[in-house]
Amino acid sequence: MKKKKSKKKQTNSNLKDQKLGQTKNSAKLVLFVFGIGPIIGIIIFLYSKGFFNPPTI
């Protein structure tokens, strides 16, 4: 005889999938903030110091 799967196991797997999706989204957000954020900050800093302006002779 085949065993029937209980509904609790299915709902638990759905909850795990939702938690995993939230984890993936938060991981993407953290990587964006700490990956792209410093690069943008450095560019703004260098621009404010005149790094991208042509040298005056």
Image: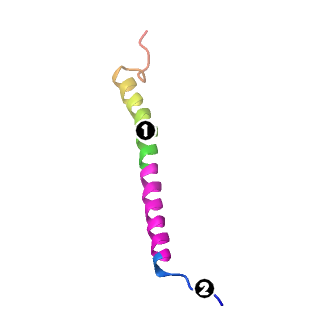
Q: Which mark is residue 15?
A: none
The extreme bottom residue here reads 1
- What is the secondary structure assignment of the residue under circle 2? loop
The residue pinned by badge 1 equals: 34
The part of the image, by quadrant, that contains residue 55 is: top left
Q: CA distance from mark 1 to mark 2?
A: 48 Å
Q: Which residue is mark 2?
A: 3
Q: Is residue 27 magenta?
A: yes
- Up the image or down, 51 lies above or below 15; here it is above
Q: Nearer the viewer, residue 41 or 32?
A: 32
The amino acid marked with disc number 1 is Phe
Amino acid on which disc 2 is placed: Lys
Where residue 53 sits in the image (x, y, percent)?
41, 22
Residue found at x 40% / y 37%: 37
Task: Write the residue at 41% across / 12% down.
Answer: 56
The one nearer the camera, 3 or 27, is 3
Question: Residue 49: x, y in percent?
Answer: 35, 20
Q: Secondary structure at mark 1?
A: helix
Q: Nearer the viewer, mark 1 or mark 2?
A: 2
For the rendered model, the colour scheme is rainbow
In the displayed orientation, state which residue is furthest to the left: 48
Is 26 inside the magenta-drawn segment? yes
Residue at horizontal 42 percent and vertical 33 percent from the top: 38
Is the C terminus in the top left, top right, bottom left or bottom right quadrant?
A: top left
Write down the region rendered in magenta: 9-28
| Sooner in the amino-acid sequence: mark 1 or mark 2 | 2
